[in-house]
Image: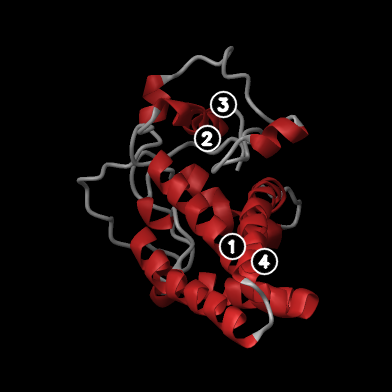
């Protein structure tokens, strides 16, 4: 990804097959509409089929939501920005995240597309169930809710100015990740783990580049471009 020229319009072509290409695009409302009912049912099923109190289940879900923030950092740093000499791994990294750095204004790829996301969460649920058994029905909803909130935050960062002053550091952290140094500022929903692992930007020293920031924001009035 390093050294790529940022494109201010258009979108990457990830697959030659038009059907596969279509599966690489998504929208926040669609993801929320698909996953929230699953999370609610999962939580309900766990409460009605296993001997767990609501207090315990909510506690586990809140912990899972917090755990997501750590997973978000690790995934962004070591999977999305995967460094490898193998061409296949480079392609994987580009499909997963590199195309977003290349075409940051492409709103259709700011959210994990529905079909790939369903496959991934099914794998996550299976692994969690093998390890945690019935507690999965409390942990999984919190973890996936964390993902939905993270993805929504990412979408908003590329769509609007921060709605509240206290959110400005999050916006600036991600903007600097794009146009200053892609090997820093991996947190999107928070900057906690960047601070813990020493990859945070010194926002007091980094000046705001309005031009470069605007290059990362998609035009909300413009229709999604055809493939």
Dot 3 or dot 1: first in sequence order is 1
Q: Position of residue 34 (x, y in %)?
A: 42, 73
Q: Residue at x 43, y 51 (%)?
A: 152
- Cα distance between the residues tagged 2 and 3: 10 Å
Q: Residue at x 56, y 52 (%)?
A: 97
Q: Secondary structure at mark 1?
A: helix
Q: Is residue 183 visible?
A: no
Q: Report which residue position mark 1 lands on.
A: 142
Quadrant (top left/top right/bottom left/bottom right) for the C terminus? bottom left
- Cα distance between the residues tagged 1 and 4: 13 Å
Mark sitting on residue 56: 4
Q: Are marks 1 and 4 in contact (CB under 8 Å)?
A: no
Compared with 13, 70 (above or below) is: above
Q: Quick one: 91 or 51, which is closer to the camera?
A: 51
Q: Quick one: 105 or 154, which is closer to the camera?
A: 154
Q: Report which residue position mark 2 lands on.
A: 174
For discs 4 and 2, the disc positioned in front in the rendered view: 4
Dot 3 or dot 4: first in sequence order is 4
Dot 1 or dot 2: first in sequence order is 1
Mark sitting on residue 180: 3
Q: Residues within 10 Å of mark 3 (few under 14, many from 20)?
A: some
């Amino acid at each position: 990804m390093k050294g790529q020229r940022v494109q201010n319009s258009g979108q990457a072509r990830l697959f030659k097959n038009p059907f596969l290409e279509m599966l690489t695009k998504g929208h926040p409302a669609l993801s929320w509409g698909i996953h929230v009912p699953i999370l609610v049912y999962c939580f309900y099923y766990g409460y009605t089929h296993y001997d767990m109190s609501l207090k315990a289940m909510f506690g586990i879900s809140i912990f899972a939501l917090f755990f997501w923030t750590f997973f978000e950092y690790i995934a962004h740093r070591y999977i999305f920005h995967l460094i490898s000499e193998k061409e296949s791994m480079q392609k994987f990294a580009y499909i997963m995240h590199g195309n977003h750095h290349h075409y940051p204004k492409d709103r259709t790829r700011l959210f994990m597309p529905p079909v790939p996301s369903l496959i991934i969460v099914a794998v996550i649920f299976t692994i969690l169930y093998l390890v945690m058994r019935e507690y999965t029905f409390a942990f999984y909803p919190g973890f996936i809710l964390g993902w939905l909130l993270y993805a929504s935050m990412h979408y908003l960062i590329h769509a609007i100015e921060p709605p509240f002053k206290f959110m400005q550091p999050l916006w600036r952290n991600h903007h600097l990740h794009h146009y200053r140094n892609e090997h820093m500022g991996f947190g999107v929903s928070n900057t906690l783990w960047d601070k813990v692992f020493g990859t945070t930007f010194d926002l007091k020293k980094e000046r705001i580049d309005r031009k470069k920031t605007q290059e990362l924001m998609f035009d909300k009035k413009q229709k999604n471009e055809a493939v």
